[in-house]
Amino acid sequence: MSQLASRLRAWLVIGAGWLLCRLPERPLLAAADIVGLAWYRLAKDRRRQARQNLARVCRWMADHEVGSARGRAAASDRRTLESLVRDAFRHSVRYNLILARGAIMDARYLGRWLMLENADELDAALAEPAGSLFVGLHMGSMELPALYAALKTGRQAVAPAETLGDPRIQAYMVRSRQKLGLRLVDLTSARREMIAALRRGETVGIVGDRDLTGGGIEVPFFGAPASLPIGPALLALETGITPHVIGVWRDDDGVYHAHVEQVPFPETGSRRERVTAYLEAEARAFERYVAIAPEQWFAVFFAIWRTDAGRS
């Protein structure tokens, strides 16, 4: 791409973000739903992948009699399942819209749009002098509790992120996340940076529901083997900090709910046994959160389970 084209693309991205921050939210959400439905109709392969993943999740929910009634019903009703697939596209677009409007988010915004289900436990974790480690999912809006943590502690949370190819857009993304209370670190140095932050008593956030590098460990996840990244387990192992898994989901009124639960790291066994046991417990926490609103789990757009490899 030429320098001019790259510059124009950066201006468009930054300009769109500026504009979205100055328009009222509810009409934008309605527009996002229209875009999401159009995306659903056009993205055949992604639609198929989401349907396949949600069918597995909903069967597990029905078998275990947990989670939303709608999700359980989708295990045996194709129309209900397809409505979840459509909503997955809608929620994904809504998430990106909220992310683009990060510059306007402040304490007042959180007071309106974020509900902490167990605020005392979250506050206690943030107050730990040895540092706080939160493991999240690609679900809801993790940036809202990150902003809450920054306002509560007076410091940014450290989180790993891929570096984008366009330096202008990368700089814009870094600035945007800083306003949300996040200090992004490059994946190549993320482990070192996050360990250092935890040892300084800071807050670290990391997502753990998709193995992007292929170096994860397989554990049962919604009834079938899935590879989960070992990053959260290694951070806990090397720092001695007990991780908290955090789930975020959106209700019908547009309010985001956040809940944390502590997932202790095993004290006995070999290194691999302890890591695997932790990931199994982490997967159970992920299952509980996804079951609340499976259509809001953005990982459904990607291959997750080994038993699905090669399937279309």
Image (cartoon, rainbow, N blue to C red):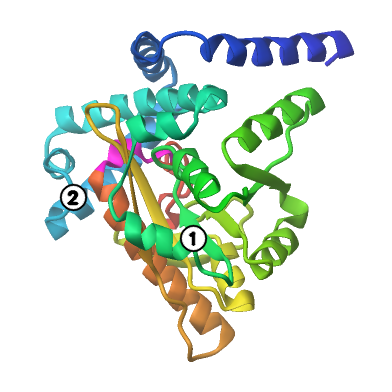
Instruction: Residue 273 in the image: state x and y as whole percent.
Output: 50, 83
Please say whether residue 282 is visible from this viewpoint: yes
Nearer to us of marks 1 and 2 is 1
Tell me whether circle 1 and circle 2 mark residues in contact (CB < 8 Å): no
* Above or below 215: residue 34: above
Q: Please state which of residues 212 and 47 is positioned toward the viewer in this rendering.
A: 212
What range of the chain is rendered magenta?
293-298
Secondary structure, mark 2, is: loop
Q: Mark 1 points at which residue?
A: 126
Q: Please state which of residues 229 and 32 is positioned toward the viewer in this rendering.
A: 32
Magenta span dominant secondary structure: helix
Amino acid found under the numbered disc labelled 2: Gly
- How crowded pointer 1 is (Cα within 10 Å; few <14, some 14-19, many 20+) is rated as many
* Above or below 137: residue 48: above
User: What residue is rendered at 22% in x and 46% in y?
Assistant: 58
Instruction: Residue 11 in the image: state x and y as whole percent.
Output: 73, 11
User: What residue is rendered at 22% in x and 28% in y?
Assistant: 252
* Above or below 140: residue 132: below
Q: Please state which of residues 191 and 229 is positioned toward the viewer in this rendering.
A: 191
Quadrant location, the N terminus: top right
Amino acid found under the numbered disc labelled 1: Leu
Instruction: Residue 230 in the image: state x and y as whole percent.
Output: 57, 66
Left or right: 7 in relation to 252: right
Q: Mark 2 points at which residue?
A: 67
